[in-house]
Image (spheres, helix red, strand yellow):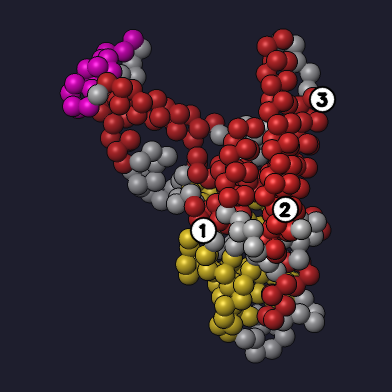
Amino acid sequence: MREVTLFWKRDRIKDLDIGELTNIFKQAEFISYVKRVPKDIRIILKVNFCDGKSPKDIVDLHFLELLDVILEPRDNSDSYLILVKLNHSVSNLNARTNGTSSVPGSRLDGEGLTYIIQGPPIKLRLVSTLARLIAQPDRISARSLDFNSTLNHSALSTKQLKLAKFAYDRGFFDIPKRTRISDLASEIGLARATISEHLARIESILMDDMFSSYDEAYTDPKLVKSLIETVTMEIENDDMNLVDNMIHLLSDIKKSISSQIVELKSEEFDEKTDDELIELAVKEYEENLSFIDEIVEEKFKSSSN
């Protein structure tokens, strides 16, 4: 289990699709979930409004819907406690992974927006990658969480951990190997191909858990395209506020991709093979830019006319 903290300065938030937050809230702190499914995420927030603003101004936020004012402040130094429905691409993906979640400490304050998420490394990377694509954070930190239970909070599932231990005990990971996949498969009673696939998956998860970075500049273009497809599928064309927001969000992603292309082209490599890999990555990034333009033109612009 890992925890990733992403932070954006307040003045940078203003230019994003959630920028209107800074005009309404002085502070907003995540307290807890009430309901958590994609496109219907209900959360409790502790908030202080900007001067002249009140709960009724939340209607101006396309991604937040005020459901209830749980507690009103007794004086100016006190805070509101409100129940809202959240509908944003990052939070929806967070809910859809069925493994990652935001935690208390996530907040908007005078310094900026702090977004803290916890979960298994691979699922956590999906959510953090989408957040970074929309706007590169000013700070990113990650840490492993120790709940004094290696079995329950390993990067591997319980079944994967048992299979890995079984293979280890029989010398599958020794050099040279003391057993073959076919021997393991025969003893367990599963097909050789099934055992081979499971062990390859286990190795991939462990490598990702050990060496993955949540702040690396390079993002796999194939993952970028997959995330773009995921977030655009959830938008209903008859909701113009959400359509306009999605166009804004895709524009932010385009800026991020363009920035990565510039960085890739500026790198110098000694090996020809490396140059070819960079050229391929640039080509895939450029294809993603065209893909975004196609989505905006075909799916969203037509509905906004």
Distance from disc 3 to disc 2, alpha carbons, whole Å, reads 37 Å
> Does 181 lie within the magenta span?
yes
Residue 42 shows in the view: yes
| Residue 213, horizontal then vertical, whole percent | 60, 36
User: Which residue occupies the extreme bottom position in the image?
Assistant: 74
Task: Give the residue type at disc 1.
Answer: Pro
Q: Position of residue 56 (x, y in %)?
A: 69, 81
Residue 38 numbered tag: 1
Q: Alpha carbon of mark 2 to alpha carbon of mark 1: how far?
A: 25 Å
Q: Are marks 1 and 3 in contact (CB under 8 Å)?
A: no
Q: How many marks?
A: 3
- For the point 65% across and 80% down, the residue is 79
Quarter where residue 242 is shown: bottom right
Of residues 7 and 17, which is closer to you in this image? 17
Residue pointed to by mark 3: 266
Pointer 3 or 2: first along the chain: 3
Q: Which residue is mark 2?
A: 302
Residue at the image position 36 percent from the left and 12 percent from the top: 175
- Mark 3, secondary structure of its residue: helix
Residue 285 to residue 2: above or below:
above
Asked which secondary structure carries label 1, the reply is: loop
Q: Is residue 280 left or right of residue 231?
A: right
What range of the chain is rendered magenta? 176-190
Lower sequence index among marks 2 and 1: 1
Q: Amino acid at mark 2?
A: Ser
Image location of residue 99, percent across then percent down: 45, 50
